[in-house]
Image (cartoon, rainbow, N blue to C red):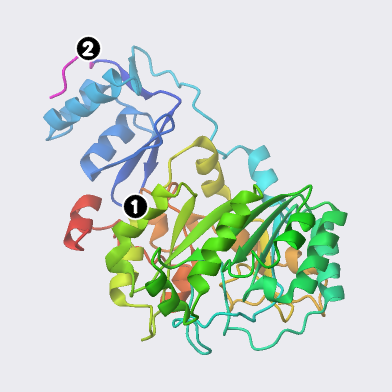
Amino acid sequence: MVELKEQVDLSGYLRLLPHMRLVLGGRRGCLYNLLNGAMYSMNNAVTDFLVQTLGINHEELTVSDALKKSANDKELIEIVYQLVNNGDAIILNEPYILKSARFGRSPKLKQIFSSKGLERIYLQITSLCNLNCIFCKPGYKMLRSTGCLRGLISDNTMTIEDWKEVLRQAYKAGAKTLIIYGGEPLLTIDCFSEVIIYAKYLGFKDMIIYTNGTLIQEYMDILYKLFNGVHAIFVIQWFSHTKKVHDCITQKSGSFEKMISGINKLKEYSFAVYIKYVITSLTINNFSNEINYLKSIKIPYHCDYIYSNKSMIGGSSELLNFASNPSMRFQKITCSIIQMYEEEHPCLSGQIAINSDGYAFPCPLMIGMKLGCVKSIPLGKIIALNETKKWWQLTPDKRLKCRDCEFRLGCFDCRAVQLSINDETDTQYCLYDPLSLKSFEEQLKERGF
């Protein structure tokens, strides 16, 4: 039992303060705290009690009346004490409705989200690469977060003029962020330069470059001039902090030294650098050491995984289970995050990816979901397609399994990962079963987490 700061009168009506939000799932509920960003899952009995006392359903009860209907009043009393004494709820003499934080359900906000235009565009200016990573072979179903997609695209038919036309249409449609990926985009430095120069001319201010880092030192003078006046972020693929392991994965001797030199050169010229740590079945056992090293060099990083439902080098069921741990996708809850999750997909909304053959996709990795080809269909028409809007507006409530999860408004979702597992677009690859009688913690413990 918590130590009471003051006596709590249970004869009144319980009200959450504006920074708290109760989200209902298929079997459990969850309290979202917008001040500390935390989520607190609750069993069915506690959830039903809060629904009755908070006036969510038509039957609104005082705390004491709701306790009389419950068989486990001791636990529920403690929940009430914790909420009140932690400053998350109050008890009122009358069933007043407190004005809560705005979460995105107002008609005006719904209209804003539904009429949202293009915000960012991904361009794969080449599928060629100067490395030969062991997990990246033609025919492999190698899917993960944005980076090198070598082997998945056979041709590179887009010309510089084609790219300029795409950029012009994208900017007209509202895009202000340009993201370039490959292959290795710096292999085609002339095309790369033309694309950046034209994007700057149009007015693109934010640019993100995905690269393996091995050519940066060679082209730094060009890069420094190209990105003058814009905000550029270089995202570097990272496999290991040891030369032996890194070069073993890339199958390119000296690639580690060139990558490190590239990172150092970027820092020397005050470019923003971000590391994409790609975890494979060959490096997962050294995960903790790798994370400690990345923290020590003080460069922002993000963990990425090799997913596959095929038998292949670099992917494994162990790695898939590790990557499917739902707690690794939880985000710090804010009002803006809840707004976004209720009205749009947190990743797909507002974006289009164009590959080196001109095909448009909702995401660079969703290569089985073609929206059209910019060589025959104007980009504006592709953006206006119902199929495009469907991906942009794919909220948790529209996804099987997710819709029953109490964590759905605070858990990041990747449709590309789902497609890599079973080719379904509206289910969830998560290991958590929201309809189970077992809690989130109990389920993860059973899985070995």
Is residue 54 shown above or below 410?
A: above
Q: Identify the amino acid type marked 1.
A: Asn
Residue under the point 87% across and 74% down: 161
Is residue 390 shown above or below 182?
A: above
Residue 7 within the magenta-colored segment of the rendering: yes
Residue 330 visible within the image: no
Seen from the viewer's position, the closer of residues 216 and 180 is 216
Q: Position of residue 426 (x, y in %)?
A: 48, 67
Seen from the viewer's position, the closer of residues 329 and 135 is 135
Q: Which mark is residue 211?
A: none
Q: Which mark is residue 5?
A: 2
Residue under the point 64% across and 64% down: 217
Residue 199: name its quadrant. Answer: bottom right
Q: Is residue 223 left or right of residue 428?
A: right
Q: Is residue 422 left or right of residue 180?
A: left
Seen from the viewer's position, the closer of residues 69 and 84 is 84
Residue 415 within the magenta-colored segment of the rendering: no
Q: Nearer the viewer, mark 1 or mark 2?
A: 1
Residue 12: name its quadrant. Answer: top left
Is residue 14 shown above or below 225?
A: above
Residue under the point 15% across and 32% down: 75
Q: Quadrant of the C terminus?
A: bottom left
Stretch in magenta: 1-10
Q: CA distance from mark 1 to mark 2?
A: 41 Å
Q: Position of residue 289 (x, y in %)?
A: 30, 58
Q: Residues within 10 Å of mark 2 (few under 14, many from 20)?
A: few
Residue 398 visible within the image: yes
N-term-proximal mark, 1 vs 2: 2
Kindly identify which residue carries mark 1. Answer: 292
Q: Position of residue 401 (x, y in %)?
A: 38, 61
Query: Which is the main secondary structure of the residues drawn in magenta?
Result: loop
Label 2 SS: loop
